[in-house]
Image (spheres, grey):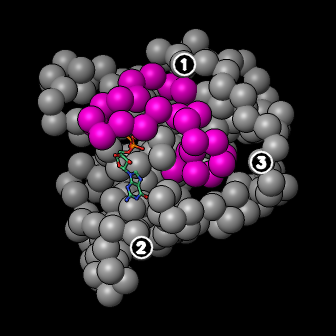
Amino acid sequence: MKISEVNFIGSFVKESDCPKSDLYEFAFIGRSNVGKSSLINMLTGRKKIAKVSSTPGKTQLLNFFEINDAWYLVDLPGYGYAKSSKKNREKWRIMIERYLETRENLACIFLLIDSRHELQTIDLDFINYLGAARLPFVLVYTKSDKVKEPELLSNIESIENSLRQHWEDLPQRFLTSSTKRIGQTEILGFIEGVLTNA
Ligand code: GTP
Ligand code: MG
């Protein structure tokens, strides 16, 4: 799929504020600083459409982008930001869960995992939540340029072995690097497939 048009629609505090639309929606979520905004910029081929920051916790709202007048891409605030208070984390949880569970046109969630590390408890908890809530999601390994291939493959194997202790079937996965533009064709192809079959 070629991306010819990207329009920033707005940032919303909660699901009920989000645009009422029957366009299918694809949401990007993961630990704070995992590379969500960078991935969105890479996928859309727009350098600055989503705000990238080396300080975690940059994205705090539900940010909507309309792509090719045909679908929405949503940049969600990251979880696990160490410096956020318990109250803020609870606010985040309520906002995200309400959005994910009630948004009717949500076609698929891209759950981003940092390919440099083993599976973090907070990622596992979130994956278990998605599975228990029966929400459709796929895995996206980010920052693959930052580790050498053998380490990358062993990290992914270790992450997926950890997941297999909880889940029989694992969702589809994508390997990405926003700096090296790896994974763009695969992810856009996947989205196109979902839209075509919907
Ligand atoms: P929050 O919105 O704060 O939750 O962060 P985020 O998940 O949107 O992460 P963001 O895209 O802002 O990236 C965080 C940092 O990681 C930035 O310094 C990026 O430049 C860097 N980064 C993101 N993706 C990649 C990648 O694929 N490769 C490399 N080398 N660095 C990356
Ligand atoms: Mg962000």
Q: What is the C-alpha distance between the residues marked 1 and 2?
A: 36 Å
Residue 99 is covered by the magenta coloring: no
Give the labeled residue for mark 1: 11
Secondary structure state at the residue bearing disc 2: loop
Residue 181: x, y in percent?
56, 62
Q: What's the residue type where badge 1 is placed? A: Ser
Mark whose residue sits in front, 3 or 2: 3
Prevailing SS of the magenta stretch: loop
Query: Where is residue 24, by image quadrant?
Result: top right
Residue 194: x, y in percent?
74, 55
* Magenta extent: 39-63
Q: Is residue 141 above or below residue 126?
A: below
Query: Where is residue 182, by image quadrant?
Result: bottom right
Q: What's the residue type where badge 2 is placed? A: Glu
Residue drawn 42% across and 73% down? 168
Residue 54: x, y in percent?
30, 40
